[in-house]
Every structure is written in structure tokens, then in C-alpha cells.
Image (spheres, grey):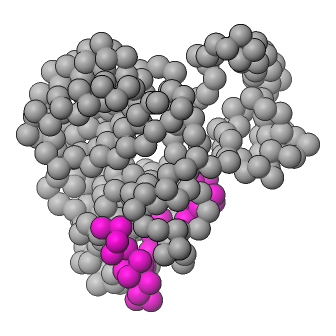
């Protein structure tokens, strides 16, 4: 069994270079794979490893009181969902390009999953999905507004140019694991919105804790690993990712005449270059060969 750990925390890390090096060495030595991002504003990442390895990583993080209160979620998988380890230094742990938006210094109000339904059922509350358009399309909360962004850095423009909401209007925001909506809440407060709420732990925590029969979530939740999507109880969904355009595809979309596994789909078959198509075909052949030999192909995904 592989333990998958999703974590983030906004905190001041003036010694971020030292912290980055410490955890890069630790994760390498423990055989952990996945991605960890470090910036002056904190830590963000999803990694996977043995139970013992993840426990040691957690213990090391908790030994630094700057990571106290870190948002953390676990799930398990029969297979390692990542092919390599990436520990990176970044300007931001989630890119918004509004330097003043720092949840460590100012943020909205956390809402626990058990209280989320009551909040978003209030007709006077604007419910904003802060994720990207392709994520929203495979699942979201009832009556949520889709800003139709391609990347998170477009969110400020959406708020300033299209939201058209009074500054005293209640705003409730959510995202996959909580980090984007938490940073978005800081931005909204900067913009003068008075009552800003965000789902603590994000959709993943909601799907983990709220019984399906009480849930207001519809569809699947896109995740950035080999599982592609999860549903209630964090069970793996049926979506696949097109290697040609990296878009999530439903089982029905995979039946399209334009879908070729590992190569292209109905969204990109008429846009992909001949060179890229040839490279994808050759790569897919190697994946099939590796599977037949019970081996793992390290180029199996772009996630």
C-alpha cells in the first residue's frame, strides 16, 4: 500500500533555501515521490511513499513550529501514483501574482466541511469555484459559479471585471485541497469584500467527511496525480487524462473515434502536430511493452 499525502501551509520562511535543501534530501533518502514546492510564503505539495516514509516526513515537518496547523490529507493507492520526486523553489506556492495576497497575514473565514452545506444553501451567498474550467466541468457544488479561468492567475481579473458583486455580499469559495481558495480569500479581502469564507481542506476533505447521501457535490473531483479523479470517500473515479492536451476525459469521451490512448482525443486531434503525434505513438508503444514485462514506464504521464 502506498500512502498519498497532500499538504500545504502558509507561513513565513525567510530561510527557504535551507528548508528546501533539508526536505529535498529527506524525501530522496526516504524514497518519497511526488512534488513539494517551497517559497517564502510556505509549503505546498502532494507526495507518496510507504507508511514509514510519510510518517517520518510528517514528524520532521511538525518539529518546526512554523508548520503548526498545516493542512494535511491522506489517501491510499495500490500503486505509486508518481514517477519521480520534484522538490522546487518557487516565488509562490500557488501562483496568483498578487504579492499582497498572503493568507498568513490576512485571509477569509475557514468553514469546516460539516458546516459547508448550510452556508452554500443560503440564497444570499455567492458560491465561487476557484479552480480552472476543465476541473469545474467534471464536478462542482450545486449552484456554484464557474469563473471560466484557464489558470489561477486569471482569477483576480475575473473578480475585478466580471463578478459585479457588492462588497458586503457573502462570498463562499472552494477548491481541490483548500490552498487556492485560501489565497483567493486573501485577495478578496484586499479588494474590500467584507464577508469571505472558504472551505477548510477543500473538496477532498468534504468528500472524505460528508456522507454521500448528504452531499451537495455533483460529479468527480479532478486530482493532479495518476488517479485523475476521485469521488465520495476519495474512491478513484473513471476519468483518464489525454496525453496530447492533458484534459480529463470521461468514459464516454474515451469512446470517441478521435480518442487514441496515450496520443490524442476529440479535443486535440485536429490541433496536435504530426511530430507530437508520432512521439506520443512511440511513447505509448513503450508503455505497452513495459506493462507486458510488469515494469513501470517513467514517462507514463504528464501529471
Point out residue 299 in the picture as x, y percentages from the top left corner: 61, 19
284 in relation to 74, above or below? above
Start-end of magenta stretch: 112-140
Q: Nearer the viewer, residue 301 or 42?
A: 301
Q: Residue 9 appears in which quarter of the rendering? A: top left
Q: How many marks?
A: 0
152 in relation to 144, above or below? above
Q: Is residue 105 left or right of residue 240?
A: left
Q: Residue 228 appears in which quarter of the rendering? A: top right
Q: Residue furthest right?
A: 257
Q: Is residue 141 visible?
A: no
What residue sits 83% from the left and 39% below the top? 259
Q: Residue furthest bottom?
A: 123
Q: Is residue 122 in the magenta section?
A: yes
Q: Is residue 225 left or right of residue 115?
A: right
Q: Is residue 264 left or right of residue 177?
A: right
Q: Residue 56 appears in which quarter of the rendering? A: top left
Q: Can you say which quadrant of the picture contains the C terminus? A: top right
Q: Is residue 192 in the magenta section?
A: no
Point out residue 155 in the picture as x, y percentages from the top left corner: 44, 58
What residue sits 69% from the left and 32% below the top? 243
Q: Residue furthest front?
A: 1
Q: Nearer the viewer, residue 226 or 174?
A: 226
288 in relation to 128, above or below? above
Point out residue 3 in the picture as x, y percentages from the top left corner: 41, 34
What residue sits 76% from the left and 18% below the top? 288
Q: Is residue 25 visible?
A: yes
Q: Nearer the viewer, residue 144 or 272?
A: 144
Point out residue 186 in the picture as x, y percentages from the top left corner: 26, 61
What residue sits 17% from the left and 25% below the top? 19
Amino acid at each position: 500500500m502506498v500512502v498519498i499525502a497532500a499538504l500545504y501551509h502558509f507561513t513565513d520562511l525567510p530561510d527557504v533555501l535551507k528548508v528546501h535543501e533539508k526536505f529535498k534530501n529527506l524525501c530522496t533518502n526516504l524514497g518519497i515521490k511526488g512534488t513539494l514546492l517551497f517559497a517564502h510564503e510556505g509549503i505546498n505539495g502532494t507526495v507518496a511513499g510507504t507508511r514509514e516514509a510519510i510518517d517520518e516526513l510528517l514528524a520532521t515537518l511538525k518539529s518546526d513550529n512554523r508548520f503548526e496547523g498545516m493542512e494535511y490529507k491522506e489517501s491510499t493507492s495500490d500503486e505509486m501514483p508518481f514517477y519521480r520526486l520534484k522538490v522546487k523553489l518557487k516565488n509562490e506556492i500557488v501562483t496568483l501574482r498578487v504579492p499582497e495576497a498572503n493568507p498568513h497575514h490576512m485571509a477569509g473565514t475557514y468553514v469546516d466541511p460539516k458546516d459547508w452545506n448550510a452556508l452554500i444553501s443560503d440564497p444570499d451567498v455567492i458560491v465561487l469555484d476557484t479552480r480552472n474550467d476543465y476541473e469545474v466541468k467534471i464536478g462542482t457544488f450545486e449552484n456554484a459559479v464557474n469563473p471560466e479561468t484557464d489558470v489561477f492567475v486569471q482569477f483576480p481579473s475575473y473578480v475585478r471585471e466580471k463578478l459585479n458583486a457588492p462588497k458586503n455580499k457573502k462570498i463562499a469559495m472552494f477548491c481541490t485541497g483548500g490552498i487556492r481558495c485560501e489565497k483567493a480569500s486573501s485577495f478578496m479581502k484586499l479588494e474590500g469584500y467584507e464577508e469571505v469564507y472558504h472551505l477548510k481542506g477543500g473538496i477532498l476533505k468534504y468528500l472524505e467527511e460528508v456522507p454521500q447521501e448528504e452531499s451537495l457535490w455533483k460529479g468527480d473531483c479532478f486530482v493532479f496525480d495518476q488517479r485523475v479523479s476521485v469521488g465520495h470517500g476519495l474512491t478513484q473515479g473513471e476519468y483518464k487524462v489525454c496525453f496530447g492536451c492533458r484534459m480529463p476525459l470521461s468514459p464516454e469521451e474515451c469512446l470517441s473515434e478521435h480518442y487514441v490512448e496515450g496520443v490524442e482525443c476529440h479535443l486535440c486531434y485536429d490541433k496536435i502536430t504530426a511530430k507530437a503525434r508520432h512521439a506520443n505513438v512511440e511513447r505509448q508503444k513503450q508503455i505497452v511493452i513495459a506493462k507486458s514485462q510488469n515494469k513501470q514506464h517513467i514517462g507514463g504521464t504528464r501529471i
